[in-house]
Image (tube, grey):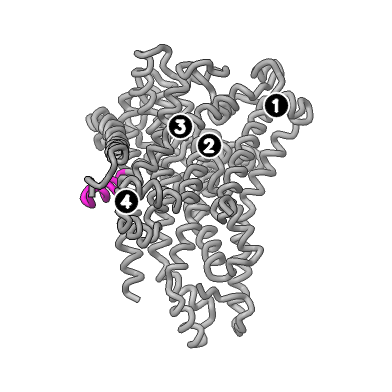
Amino acid sequence: MAETLSRPQNLREWLAFVLVWGAAGLVTAVFCWLLGDIVWHGIGHVSWTFLTAPPENAGRQGGIGPILASTSLILGVCLAVSLPIGIGTAVLLAEFTSDQSLFGRITRRSLDILAGVPSIVFGLFGNAFFCKMLGLGFSILSGGLTLACMVLPVLIRSTEEGFRAVPASYRLSAAALGLSRTTTLIHLLLPAAVPGLLVGLVLGVGRAIAETAALIFTSGYVDRMPESLLDSGRALSIHIFDLSMNVSGGDTNAYASALILVIMLLAINGTVSWLATYGLHRKIMTV
Amino acid sequence: MTSLSNNTLSRWSTDELLCWSLRGIATIAGTIVMLIVVFLIVEALPVLHHVGLLRFFTDPSWHPAEGLYNLTPMLWGTLFAMTGSVLIATPLGILSAVFCHYYAPSVLARPYRRLIELLAGVPSVVYGFWGLVVLVPLIAEIQPPGPSLLAGILILTIMILPTIALMADASLANVPQQYLRGAAALGLPRWATIRGVVFPAVRSGLFTGVILETGRAIGETMAILMVCGNVVQIPSTIFDPIRTLTANIALEMAYAIGDHRAALFVSGLVLLAMIVALVVSAEWVSRGRMYG
């Protein structure tokens, strides 16, 4: 085929080939550089003591024990609030409203906008609403609630997909058997939609763990072990930020914390793609 | 999609109950955006009242303590960083997707796609940290001081690249097979097919991707805060430090009170307005009105 091409055409093809491979190579190289750098500098400091010990000397020495505890508490609050709301909304959008209804359209549109709202704006909102107006102050509760608002769109989107992937025959057969819609939902649709729900859950957790900007003015900086949900607690991402920006000589511990954070997120991403490829697939295939 | 619409003859009162409680829940989810807008406006009102909107653009400088609230340098900072990174990330991202679909052998295409997905999941604070310890010293060697618009653009580029790459990848996967076969039957070589047949077919998908990445670039806070130097000024070269709207909020919120705090909420409103404009235009494009 190549010999039928005119010369400039040939040159253009060759150039495109180089460009495309070059772009892919560049992206791969940057990725390896980034990840390699974090692993290389961080791996030496990660140990069981590092994971459990409290930070000392503003985080230059010691570990990240209380910070991991705060992070999981914030995450727990976030999920406890966002899961019921997210699943409820997804069920309503997928099963109980038609695509054309006004209510569904408005809800979907506002969720689309919510998904694009910058995290720092969530931080402003959380600070004004949860910390000041509801009087929760800088606390794990405020942080978790702010994050819950943030992860809702992600959660709802994939849960809705999960429900839409359930074949219509399920609903029709259940209706033919005279089952109430509540029964159909709880016993048929919900179990069948679990893979979509899990993908949403894991994506939401990923977004919540990675978040920094929304948490600075809501959950705060305090790096002690939190005693209640109304205590201020420092999330892992904020710890990295603080160590690298405000604490001179905090780089080694920042590297180790970054490595922990990246490992957590890689695990989460791995779970998502595993679920998306195998979980969802198998569910649909067994029908 | 057989949705069980509301007028199905249902004899069950539990269904009624379920439906209404779900509506209640969905209303909560749907009103969060409204709440955010309302709270931003309420918190911003005092300063809008005292100072007026115009002075945010005409004041001589940004010195909130002295009552001077000029947001323009930060607006320019955001715009420069956004434009630069979108200009670099868009071609790279699209070429990445093209690589996955038409150039890479299948052994490479799958891991490469996985790598882009991983890149999308790395938290912004890790990008920022890497930029701070690796990229900024490198730039400082070329041209001091190091923390600069250039560093911001490069970090943002890496961060938004997965967005456009994954979006383009999804669009390319939807190109009808007969287009490609048609092109092959005409004897078109690979790049000519991609440029002449594939790209026009996926135009709106690519455009949506660009809009999404732009939104991400505008909203990014931590990474850009860590590498940009945060000097309030309109940069004259790409080696000058800048401060973006988002970084400004993150930096000053901790100690801002009174009108200063309200001014930060005004910049939050400006950011939100930019994002809403982008979402609306994305919707416009995806409905196909853009190309008639």
Indicate the secondary structure of the residue bearing disc 3: helix
Evaluate if marks 4 and 2 touch, with contact meaning CB atoms under 8 Å apart: no
Q: What stretch is highlighted in magenta?
A: B102-115
Magenta segment: does it hold B112? yes
Q: Are marks 3 and 4 on the same chain?
A: yes
B205, A49: nearer the viewer: B205
Q: Which of marks 2 and 3 is nearer the N terminus?
A: 3
**Residue A167 in view, yes or no:** yes
**Residue at 32% across, 51% down:** B188
Could you tell me which quadrant the C terminus of chain B lies in? bottom right
User: In the picture, residue A189 is in which quadrant?
Assistant: bottom left
Amino acid type of disc 4? Leu
User: Where is mark 1, residue-wise?
Assistant: B258
Tell me which chain the residue with mark 2 is part of: B
A101, B44: nearer the viewer: A101
User: Where is mark 2, residue-wise?
Assistant: B219
- Eye-nearest disc, 1 or 4: 4
Percent coordinates x, y for residue A182 in the rendering? 53, 76
Q: Which of marks 1 and 4 is nearer the N terminus?
A: 4
Amino acid type of disc 3? Ser
- In the displayed structure, B73 sits above or below B268; it is above
User: Where is mark 4, residue-wise?
Assistant: B188
**Residue at 66% across, 47% down:** B35
C-alpha span from label 4 to label 2: 42 Å
C-alpha span from label 1 to label 4: 66 Å
Indicate the secondary structure of the residue bearing disc 1: helix
Amino acid type of disc 2? Gly
User: Where is mark 3, residue-wise?
Assistant: B85
